[in-house]
């Protein structure tokens, strides 16, 4: 009975100590014992700790004395130096011949020989012992081989559905999709990244229609997958010699147009095909164009705004220009002329032909009754003075900053001049602005917009000199 009570009390105290954190059992570090003039090989895994412990026999038994022969002084021609005592001071130095840089070492070690394996690779520690007279009387080398212990490493996700978003710009009817980016957390007792020695990351796709590449950073696996249709694949990831498999389903998502002219007071429904989850809608200028939770855009007043559909971390945008019914037709007519008719100054007055000023005249005259003071296609030298005389010039002239701030409106025209100090006598070109397009988003989620022109490629606004004449023939 007494024996049972003693056993019971022992167990109770042991459990209490564990509960209170007193005398907790910890994994013992590796002790590496070295002797004089020895070479020791040690295998570790990342995260292992331990200590190098020098071992020497009693003083005078293991150390060898030194014999000296001095030919200079015959009185001291030969003598014998007694062995030094047991070393009283040790140093532990990482051999720099193994690594060019400090951050390439596989272990760390302190002044007491305590080491920690920090990354896969090889390393060498030189141990030296010094006597009271500061003579080196002990020397040993310890060679470490450190490998990754992948037994405790796993991926938090093994099945993923990723979305392929269509590019904002499409050439013809062929739709092309952007790559899908996937982030998978890694459970690991040590931090893994692309610089981890011995990681040797490799990534393969079981489907030849799916291209994949990736990298590891701070215990996260980042994958980029490319495909041009709905499909699935099994991704095999090898890290530190261990294989992981992730099943991925890729779903194409078709967005909406990236540029739209909306009549004031009218609405436009935007839809996203291929995605049924939650979409967050927003407008950069709700006073101009508002958007409902279901993607219905309403034109409220003349101006410009970008409508954004946020799907997870992905954004799809459309640049809306709220305008009048007449100006919408003017821009449509100008764009048709600039993309379907033939440029010819000699035939500019004929149907099917145009030059820059004839395009402006032919686009405006049918829908706004504005003929810039001429009964036939005018020229820059007649259209610019008409805008000036009718109070249609915009204050301050054209600037690229104003355009980027979406201050130009569809139907605006910009004149080029060889001398801005005398613009009306040196005019030589005019272009019609037709709106904006949203081409993507920057790293802060801000829309990236590009300018559109009736007869020019998108982004042509770079070619205008700051301060060029900027006119708005009608509102």
Image (cartoon, rainbow, N blue to C red):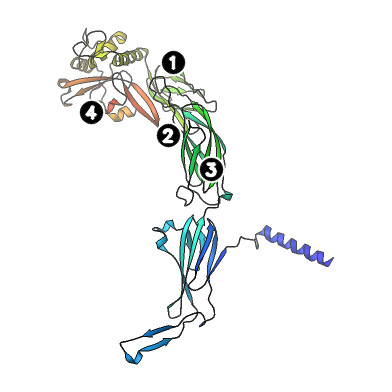
Q: Quadrant of residue 78?
A: bottom left
Q: Residues within 10 Å of mark 3 (few under 14, many from 20)?
A: some
Residue located 37% across and 13% down the image? 325
Residue 295 visible? The answer is: yes
Please tell me whether mark 1 sits on a helix, a strand or a loop: loop
The answer for how far apart the CA atoms under marks 4 and 2 are is 30 Å
Residue located 57% across and 38% down the image? 158
Towards the viewer: 281 or 128:
128
The number of callouts visible is 4
Quadrant, the N terminus? bottom right
The answer for how far apart the CA atoms under marks 1 and 3 are is 46 Å
Q: Quadrant of residue 170?
A: top left
Please tell me whether mark 3 sits on a helix, a strand or a loop: strand
* Residue picked out by circle 4: 465
Residue located 79% across and 66% down the image? 6
Quadrant, the C terminus? top left
The answer for how far apart the CA atoms under marks 4 and 3 are is 51 Å
Residue 212 percent across, percent down from the top left: 47, 36
Left or right: 274 as drawn, with respect to 74: right
Q: Which numbered marker is on residue 387?
A: none
* Residue picked out by circle 2: 445
Asked whether the beta carbons under mark 4 and mark 3 sit within 8 Å of each other, the answer is no
Residue 438 percent across, percent down from the top left: 39, 26
Q: Residues within 10 Å of mark 2 (few under 14, many from 20)?
A: few
Q: Residues within 10 Å of mark 1 (few under 14, many from 20)?
A: few
Left or right: 241 as drawn, with respect to 21: left
Towards the viewer: 376 or 147:
147
Q: Quadrant of residue 317?
A: top left
* Residue picked out by circle 3: 185
Q: From what the image shows, is residue 398 above or below residue 379?
A: below
* Residue picked out by circle 1: 266
Towards the viewer: 50 or 267:
50
């Amino acid at each position: 009975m007494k024996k049972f009570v003693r056993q019971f009390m022992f167990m109770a105290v042991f459990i209490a100590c564990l509960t209170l954190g007193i005398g907790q059992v910890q994994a013992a570090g590796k002790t590496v014992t070295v002797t004089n003039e020895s070479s020791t090989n040690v295998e570790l895994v990342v995260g292992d700790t331990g200590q190098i412990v020098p071992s020497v026999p009693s003083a005078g038994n293991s150390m060898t004395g030194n014999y000296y022969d001095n030919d200079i002084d015959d009185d001291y021609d030969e003598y014998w130096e007694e062995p030094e005592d047991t070393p009283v001071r040790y140093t532990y130095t990482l051999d720099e011949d193994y690594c060019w840089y400090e951050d390439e070492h596989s272990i760390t070690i302190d002044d007491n020989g305590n080491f920690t394996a920090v990354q896969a690779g090889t390393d060498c520690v030189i141990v030296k012992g010094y006597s009271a007279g500061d003579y080196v009387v002990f020397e040993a080398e310890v060679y470490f081989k450190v490998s990754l212990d992948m037994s405790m490493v796993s991926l938090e996700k093994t099945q993923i559905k990723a979305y392929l978003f269509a590019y904002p710009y499409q050439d013809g009817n062929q739709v092309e999709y952007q790559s899908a980016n996937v982030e998978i957390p890694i459970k690991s007792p040590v931090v893994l990244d692309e610089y981890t020695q011995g990681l040797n990351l490799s990534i393969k796709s079981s489907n030849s229609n799916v291209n994949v590449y990736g990298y590891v950073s701070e215990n996260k696996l980042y994958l980029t997958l490319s495909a041009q249709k709905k499909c699935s694949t099994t991704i095999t990831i090898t890290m530190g010699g261990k294989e992981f498999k992730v099943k991925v389903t890729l779903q194409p998502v078709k967005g909406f147009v990236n540029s739209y002219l909306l009549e004031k007071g009218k609405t436009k429904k935007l839809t996203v095909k291929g995605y049924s989850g939650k979409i967050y809608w927003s407008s950069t200028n709700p006073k101009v164009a508002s958007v409902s939770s279901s993607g219905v855009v309403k034109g409220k007043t003349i101006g410009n705004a970008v409508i954004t559909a946020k799907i997870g971390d992905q954004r799809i945008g459309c640049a809306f220009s709220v305008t009048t019914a007449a100006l919408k037709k003017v821009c449509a007519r100008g764009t048709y002329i600039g993309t379907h008719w033939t440029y010819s100054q000699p035939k500019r007055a004929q149907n099917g032909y145009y030059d820059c000023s004839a395009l402006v005249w032919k686009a405006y005259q049918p829908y706004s009754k504005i003929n810039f003071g001429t009964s036939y296609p005018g020229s820059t030298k007649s259209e610019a003075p008409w805008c000036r005389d009718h109070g249609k010039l915009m204050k301050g002239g054209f600037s690229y900053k104003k355009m980027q701030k979406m201050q130009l409106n569809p139907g605006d025209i910009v004149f080029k001049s060889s001398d801005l100090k005398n613009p009306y006598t040196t005019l030589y070109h005019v272009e019609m602005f037709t709106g904006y397009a949203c081409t993507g988003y920057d790293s802060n989620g801000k829309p990236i917009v590009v300018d559109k022109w009736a007869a020019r490629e998108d982004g042509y606004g770079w070619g205008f000199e700051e301060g060029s004449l900027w006119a708005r023939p009608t509102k």
